[in-house]
Image: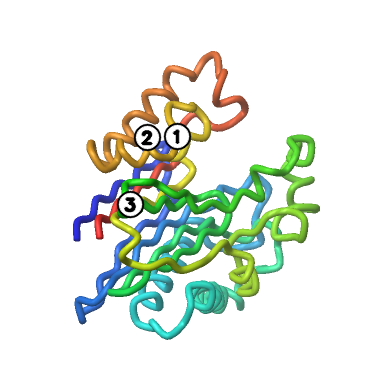
Amino acid sequence: MRTDLVSEPGDANRPNEDFAGVGLPASGQGGCAIVLDGVTPPRGGTGCLHSVPWFTARLGGALTELTVSLRDLTLPEILSRAIGRTAEAHAQTCELSHPRTPQATVALARWSADTVEYLVLSDSALLLQGADGTVTPVLDDRLARLPRSALATDALVDATLRNKEGGFFTAAADPCVAARAVAGTVPRSGVRALVALTDGATRWTETFHEGDWQALFGTVAKEGARSLVDRVRELELADREERAFLGRSKTHDDATVVYVEL
């Protein structure tokens, strides 16, 4: 097995809100890959004493431990427990019902000798390369399918869409959202390699349209995770003034790529 991991903040003067990890059980059987993208809150407070990096570190750490140690549980069950454990860590000090309580998107994979399990919640992405080289994206596209008018302001999103039916879901303080994730299982024999990415890295495909998922996977496999992030940074800088692709989005976002060759 070969792994390649890069996680880079969008701004060197601010903490990286992404989390990335690869877990390999002491038994040597199977493993897991985890990517979280912390949701940057708007100004005005979150009802929480803790930062987004604090939250993603806690949630990511819990996911890493539980995914490799509790192999009898499904990935949605693992995510539910990890969210619950993280919520308990600050339930006495913070307003966890606040719509902007620290939260994150999730891309999670776990493999054994026989199967590859996957889970995606919100707009991080997981790409599975089949034995024949074909790349299959695992995406939770609920946010992308919402009309732009519904996303006009942060207040409107928080009031009507964030972690609500008809909107989209993130890993925040409610363990029940784990059941909303896109999840499944495929035979291990049908997966040659996988890539997990936050949306700061998927910009190469989803924002700048430099190539499809197959091309993105090929870039990471051949040139490395660092190359994909560097390419995204070059495209962001080129569009910094005209913003033909970036629009109202921040120029640079935290970007994380995890590649695993099974």
Judging by the rendered image, the residue that carries numbered circle 1 is 212
Query: At 52% from the left edge and 15% from the top edge, which residue is drawn?
Result: 241
**Amino acid at pointer 2:** Ala
**Disc 3 crowd, CA 10 A, few/some/many (<14, 14-19, 20+):** many
Residue type at numbered disc 1: Asp
- Residue 162: x and y in percent read 71, 55
Q: Determine the residue positioned at 52% across, 31% down.
A: 207
Q: Dot 3 corresponds to which residue?
A: 258
Q: Is residue 79 above or below residue 233?
A: below
Quarter of the picture containing the N terminus is bottom left
- Report the mark closest to the observer, 3 or 2: 2
Mark 2 falls on what kind of element? helix
Which residue shows up at 58% across the image and 64% down it? 181
**Decide: marks 3, 2 in contact (CB < 8 A)?**
no
Q: Residue furthest top?
A: 242
**Residue 37 location in percent, x, y?**
48, 52
Residue 80 in the figure: left or right of residue 259: right
Marking on residue 50: none
Instruction: Place residue 47 in its image quadrant.
Output: bottom right
